[in-house]
Image: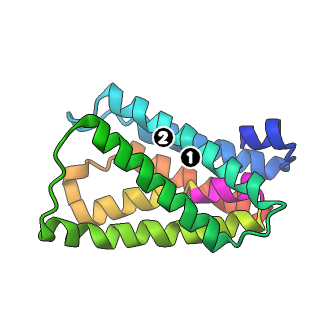
Amino acid sequence: MTIAIVAFDERPGVAVLLGALLIVCGGIALALESERPQHVRRLGIAFALLGAALFALRDNLVRHLSLDSDVPSMTAGAVMLAASLVVTSAIVAGARQRVVWPRVIVARWLVPGAFVGFSYIALFEAFYRGTVSIVSPIVATESLFGVAFSAWFLGRSEGVGRRVVAGALLVVSGAVLITAFR
């Protein structure tokens, strides 16, 4: 939202700003979970923050490029997915690690991959119709769904504690506020 305000002159209302603040506080609560599993390190948190910054940049670029475009959102989404495949392939090739393609593994990743594809279709459609200050915070509720699905599918191994639940509730409260007062 900061990029949208500074670079693209978006002017969200007070309720939208407050909702975004609640979402950020929820994200911070999730990141600062004291009962974090041992395998989560500071480097993982740093990569998560970098990922969040890259998502913010993506959101703003998609919105900015969609404003005066005759390109349908489906075409733009397909190009974006193709570009991400090229970037990922270049990184894998640069790492010089052998890529193994067992059918069982590929089959397992097809369903999550399809969900990623469908999520980008929905995301691009949203940005073609709404501002970054509305769409991005609502998309940020993915952390809530991530917590809920991890508790459901993975059970106690994810260590969902009070702080995680509080963070998820802050995220949802912010999204509800933004949706109600957009």
> Which residue is located at x 67 percent, y 70 percent?
73
Q: Residues within 10 Å of mark 2 (few under 14, many from 20)?
A: few
CB-based contact (under 8 Å), mark 2 and mark 1: yes
Q: Is residue 132 magenta?
A: yes
| 41 to the left or right of 157 | right
| Residue 115, position as x, y percentages in the image | 41, 71
How far apart are labels 2 and 1 at the CA level? 6 Å
Task: Name the residue tied to disc 1.
Answer: 55
The quadrant the C terminus occupies is bottom right
Question: Could you tell me which residue is drawn at 48 percent across and 34 percent down?
Answer: 49
Specify whether 132 is left or right of 36.
Answer: right
The magenta stretch is 131-139
Crowd rating for badge 1 (residues with CA inside 10 Å; few <14, some 14–19, many 20+): few
Quadrant of the image for the N terminus?
Answer: top right
Residue 51 is marked as 2
What percent of the width, then of the height, locates residue 106? 21, 67
Number of numbered discs on residues: 2
